[in-house]
């Protein structure tokens, strides 16, 4: 990192810094393992001491250190697995209502709030690029950028159809209704990942709609970018500045094009975005949120937690840890 050639190249310096951060985590974990291993060797040698108190202390230390050492070894095995090159990236988070009308839009708003609160706990930054509110106060669609430390590594298993089961506020007979939303998590693409030619895009400006005051609603600050080869359209009207809206829209466009390339590469193993998200139909789901039973079930790994109230407040870590442990298990990676 002190090499002048590295310092002079911003892209190379950024990549080198990320590599150093990854290695630091690995080195720190190895040092913890090394210390525990040395203590365990010492404790096993003390078992042969003639002093009964020393033998008792040694046996207690062995009982403590053996599972600790096994845990360190498991963590090191996972850390030494081949890395997803996107794990360090920031993400574009897209949430849309599926089946269920107004109830689906209300749930879309609540799930976005859940992710926002989780992001706050992680020290991440969330910037809304565009949002479409429903007439009942929910969200028909929201697109946001989430940036911070290893965001994609934590959120990459969230893509798919999320199903909610509960009694809507408008239900007079107390019947449980089922609605769905779709969630897509895409790694944010840098300019070095996706090159977009000026001739391949069309940029339109228009007056923003929604909150923001007179200046937002009367100036042509909103931006719509169309990528002509793929007919991909991205709009951004969150900022008052047309320049800022254009920059954000270009970020989202790059990420969508990058995602398309990833889908092509991963099609053989069924990781396309369409297979993750499907049509939003009730029968397609990765997770169910059952409010009457305070239950969350992730159908991919058979996980059931009866703490939905806490999860909806952003306490997602137990779910994310379970998914990560399942998909990064050494036998699966092999």
Image (cartoon, rainbow, N blue to C red):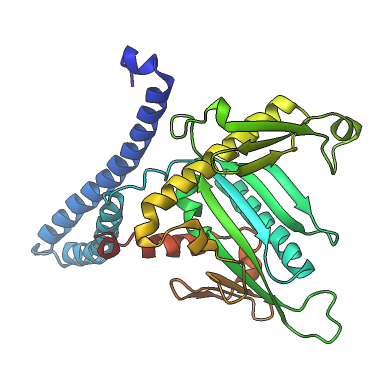
Above or below, 148 relative to 48: above
The single residue placed furthest to the right in the displayed view is 214
Residue 91 in percent (x, y) is at 54, 44
Q: Nearer the viewer, residue 24 or 169?
A: 169
Residue 228 in percent (x, y) is at 59, 38
Residue positioned 51% across, 53% down in the render: 155
Q: How many marks?
A: 0
Horizontal relation, residue 43 to residue 72: left or right: left
Residue 72 in percent (x, y) is at 28, 55
Horizontal relation, residue 269 to residue 96: left or right: left
Quadrant for the C terminus, please.
Answer: bottom left
Residue positioned 20% across, 66% down in the render: 59
Residue 100 in percent (x, y) is at 73, 72
Residue positioned 55% across, 43% down in the render: 230
Quarter occupied by residue 223:
top right
Quarter occupied by residue 16:
top left
Above or below, 159 relative to 15: below
Horizontal relation, residue 35 to residue 139: left or right: left
Quadrant for the N terminus, please.
Answer: top left
Quarter occupied by residue 58:
bottom left
Above or below, 301 relative to 258: below
Q: Residue 295: tell me if it is visible.
A: yes
Q: Nearer the viewer, residue 139 or 315?
A: 139
Residue positioned 39% across, 33% down in the render: 18
């Amino acid at each position: 990192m002190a090499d002048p050639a590295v310092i002079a190249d911003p892209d190379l310096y950024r990549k080198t810094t990320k590599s150093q951060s990854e290695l630091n985590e690995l080195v720190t974990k190895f040092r913890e393992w090394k210390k525990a291993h040395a203590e365990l060797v010492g404790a096993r040698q003390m078992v042969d001491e003639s002093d009964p108190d020393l033998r008792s202390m040694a046996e207690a230390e062995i009982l403590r250190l053996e599972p600790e050492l096994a845990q360190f070894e498991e963590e090191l095995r996972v850390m030494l697995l081949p890395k997803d090159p996107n794990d360090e990236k920031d993400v574009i988070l897209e949430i849309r209502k599926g089946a269920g009308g107004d109830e689906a839009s209300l749930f879309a708003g609540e799930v976005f709030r859940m992710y926002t609160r989780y992001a706050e706990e992680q020290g991440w930054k969330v910037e809304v690029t565009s949002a479409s509110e429903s007439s009942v106060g929910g969200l028909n669609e929201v697109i946001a950028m989430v940036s911070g430390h290893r965001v994609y590594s934590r959120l990459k298993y969230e893509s798919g159809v999320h199903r909610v089961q509960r009694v809507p506020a408008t239900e007079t007979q107390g019947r449980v209704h089922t609605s769905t939303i779709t969630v897509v998590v895409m790694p944010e693409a840098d300019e070095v990942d996706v090159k977009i030619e000026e001739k391949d895009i069309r940029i339109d400006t228009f007056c923003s709609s929604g909150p923001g005051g007179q200046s937002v609603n009367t100036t042509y600050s909103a931006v719509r970018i169309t990528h002509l080869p793929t007919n991909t359209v991205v709009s951004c009207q969150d900022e008052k500045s047309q320049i800022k809206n254009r920059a954000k829209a270009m970020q989202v466009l790059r990420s969508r094009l990058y995602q398309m390339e990833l889908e092509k590469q991963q099609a053989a193993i069924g990781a396309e975005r369409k297979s993750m998200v499907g049509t939003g139909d009730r029968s397609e789901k990765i997770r169910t949120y059952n409010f009457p039973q305070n239950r969350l079930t992730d159908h991919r790994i058979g996980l059931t937690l009866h703490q939905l109230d806490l999860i909806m407040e952003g306490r997602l870590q137990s779910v994310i840890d379970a998914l990560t442990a399942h998909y990064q298990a050494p036998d699966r990676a092999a």
